Structure formats: C-alpha cells, structure tokens
Image: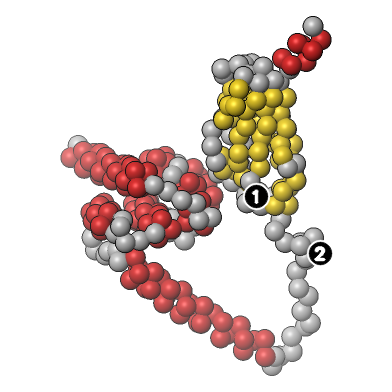
Amino acid sequence: MILLYLSSIISLQITPDSATVGDTLTANIKGALPDSVFIIKSDSFPDRIIFNSLKRFNDTLAIVQFTSFSTGPQEFKLKVNNDTLKASYLINSVLEPENRGISPIWAPYGFFNWHYLLFLLIIPLALLFYLLFKKFRMKNMELIEEDQMDPGEEALKNLKILEEKTSQWDWNKLYTSLSYISRRYIERKGKIPAVEATTSELILLLKKKGFSIFFPLSRQFPGWDLIKFARFESTQEKFDKDIAMVRTIIEQMEKEEKSDDSL
C-alpha cells in the first residue's frame, strides 16, 4: 500500500542541475502522470527555449528538453492537474569565474595619449566595416532592398526570391534571409530598429510600443535563431510552411491596412 502511494507521487527533477548558457537540460517527471500536464512558460521567455514538448515513455515517466540563455538560479514549472511542480537549476555564464564581472582598469590618460588616436580611428573604421558588411550581406543574400518600394511589396518579392534559392542555400542562410525579410518589414512598417535588435530586445520593444500586430511574426524568431546561431537542422516541409506563413501574415496585414485607408 505504501509502495503504491509513493509511486503515485509525481516528482520533477532537472538534470544536470547546473549548466552553462546554451547547454541542453532535461526535466524528468516521474510518478503516476495524468493526461493534463502543461509546461509553464517563464517570465524570461524567449530566453528559455523548449526543444520538444512533453515526451512520455510510459504512464510514470516523461521528459522535457530545453535550454536557457539567462544566467543565475532559475525554476522550471509544470502544471499537473491543479498543482504546480517546481524544480530549481543554475545557469552559469560562459565566462570563467575569475573574469566574470571584472572590467579592465586603465591608467589615467595624458593630454596627448595614443589611446585618443586609437579611439578616433576605431569609430570611422567600425562605421566603414558596418557599411561594408551590410552591403556584402545584402549582396550575398541577393535580396531586394529598396526604400522607395512599399514595405509589403518588397517583402513579398524577397520571399519569392528566397523560394527560388531553397535548393542552393543551406538552412542557416535560408533562415537568416527569412528572418531578415520579416525584421525589415517590421522595421519599415513600425519605424523601429528591428533588423539590428536581438530577438529578446525586439519582442520587448514590440510589447512596449503596443505593436501586437507584429506578434505573429516575432513569435517565430526564437525558433529561427536556433537554426541561425546554434546550427539546428530544418526540413523542406517546415521551411515551405514558414515561408507560406510569413507571406500569409504580410498579405493579411497589407489587406487590413488598405481596408482601413479606404474607410
């Protein structure tokens, strides 16, 4: 009887309980699992990325794999029936402990110090590098960038170009281009720096500005970032669905804007 009771208690444990930013962690759920088990998103979403939904092995064992891009003590939460299960884990910085949080100390500059000359040279060189990089990136992606063209028209034409490159480019380049097209559309329509912002910064900015109209696009960026930066793989079927989804969202937004203008 006691063994039966103990086996019915549901437990949650994170392994490993200490990891580095970007490492894969596993939430282990053991016990008599009901049908209704839900993952509670953290307040720092999308800093936490869920790799797969709840994977059940049997009636008493299931796992969820995820990673976190925020450092420090954190909690993973599950909703089981009317109860909330919590498990703690620690995410360490990629910096070595002896370097974490320490800034270099510079000696006071003299009036004519070579550091001044270095700083004066770095600014124009950085600007030149940025402009050349931006020009090279656009040339390499072979996408249209015409400020005189309507944002919706430009985005839809670039999606057409991207479809033609499916068999020629790898997933990293395809999703980098798809993300750029979506971000540039948001930037031109919303007049915000969507192209250069990180995904976390952009989502927070959209919420702050009240641009909920762009949420269907911005929700895709965390998953695409895994393909762009972590070299995750995709499939032709998924990529076709992602392009079709972006096209549908943009066409619907353009249609609603024209409808509002006609009123």
Q: Quadrant of residue 187?
A: bottom left
Residue 208 is situated, as x and y percent measured from the top left of the image, at: 50, 45
Could you say whether the residue bearing mark 2 is in a helix, strand or loop? loop
Q: Position of residue 237 (x, y in %)?
A: 34, 43
Q: Residue at x 43, y 44 (%)?
A: 220
Q: Residue at x 75, y 41 (%)?
A: 17
User: Can the viewer see residue 187?
Assistant: no
The residue nearer to you, when weighing 9 against 222, is 9
Residue sitting at the far top: 1
Write down the residue under mark 2.
Answer: 98
Q: From what the image shows, is residue 57 above or below residue 112?
A: above
Q: Is residue 54 left or right of residue 20?
A: left
Q: How is the image coloured?
A: secondary structure
Name which residue type carries label 1: Asp
User: Nearer the N terminus, badge 2 or badge 1?
Assistant: 1
Residue at position x 74%, y 85% in the image: 109
Q: Are marks 2 and 1 in contact (CB under 8 Å)?
A: no
